[in-house]
Amino acid sequence: MRTKAIVSLALLVLYLVTSGIFVAYERQKLFGIVQQMEQIHAELQSLARVRTGVTHSIATLEDLLSAATINPQYDDIRFDIESIEAGLAELREQSPETAQSFAPFERNVAELKAGRSRDKLIALRDSEQVLVVKLDEIHDLGDDRSLLLLQQYRELNRNITLYALCLFLLGLGAFGAVVAVFFTRLSGDIGKLEAYTTDPSAIDLTDPGRLQGEIPLGYYRIRREIEDIPGFPAELAQAVGHIILSHHGSLEHGSPVVPATREATLVHMIDNLGGRLGSFDRLEKELPPGAVWSSFDRAIGGGAYFGAQAQDGAERAAA
């Protein structure tokens, strides 16, 4: 029983650790999506600033080119050009693949700086109009990517939430089962510490075990421990005592009282289930080679059937 309890506890800890690692990994993916969304948001903001500057520059150039001045001055659009160039440099750092879209505008700006003329201003205006179209296309692609990432974020966050909830419920159930099993064996079997001898080769009842029985011995052992705890609640002491006294479930099975509370009933049922399953383990070990049915067993009220398990055991023994 001790080995099974240790294995169960180890499996529970492994389950919780593995689940925690999985959830942490999924949350890391979630953070990755958030970082991508933040990067796209920064790119869209830069695009908006650049587009505003390009739009203003086009309007200024239209005014200059429609005026009576034969050779408009470059200084009239210098601030717009510098603002656009700074914005494009920022975009190039954020998204290098967009750099090719800026080449015609940058080439016309370089030519205008080398030598100013009306024709070069017209060429610059035309390249800015093309640039606006390119910026709008990049902006639309960014919006699509942002929407896709948002959808992935929502799906992943929902899956993590559902999975974490399932892990919590399963872990809570498993932990409760392990605690219940521990308490059941503790409450039911603690009297066996005094009721039976400790010699593994010849286990037998002790004198107190024969004279008083394991249930009273266990009850008084727990009762003495409770009395040594200052301020232990009287109601809780009574409930624990009732669980110990009633865990065999009926008078004919040795309990002086039958379970009268939910907790006592639960402990009795778990203890009974452990005993019945233990009977199957015992009967399987005693099973003759090739047999699939055990003889009648009083604990389970009949014979136990092992089927394929017994056949597999016989084949392994023959091999």
Image (cartoon, grey):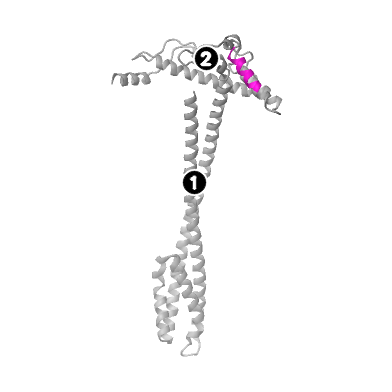
Query: Mark 1 or mark 2, which is nearer the start of the sequence?
Result: 1
Instruction: Indicate the quadrant where residue 244 lies.
Output: top right
Q: Residue furthest front?
A: 199
Locate the C terminus by quadrant.
top left
Residue 253 visible from this viewpoint? no
Q: Is residue 293 above or below residue 47?
A: above
Q: Residue 277's x, y, as percent?
A: 48, 20
Q: Residue 25's x, y, as percent?
A: 47, 47
Q: Residue 175's x, y, as percent?
A: 54, 32
> What secondary structure characterizes most of the magenta part?
helix
Front one among 172 and 148: 172
Q: Which mark is residue 197?
A: 2
Q: Is residue 257 above or below residue 171?
A: above
- Asked if the magenta segment contains residue 56, the reply would be no
Q: Which residues are magenta?
A: 213-224
Report the residue marked by disc 1: 24
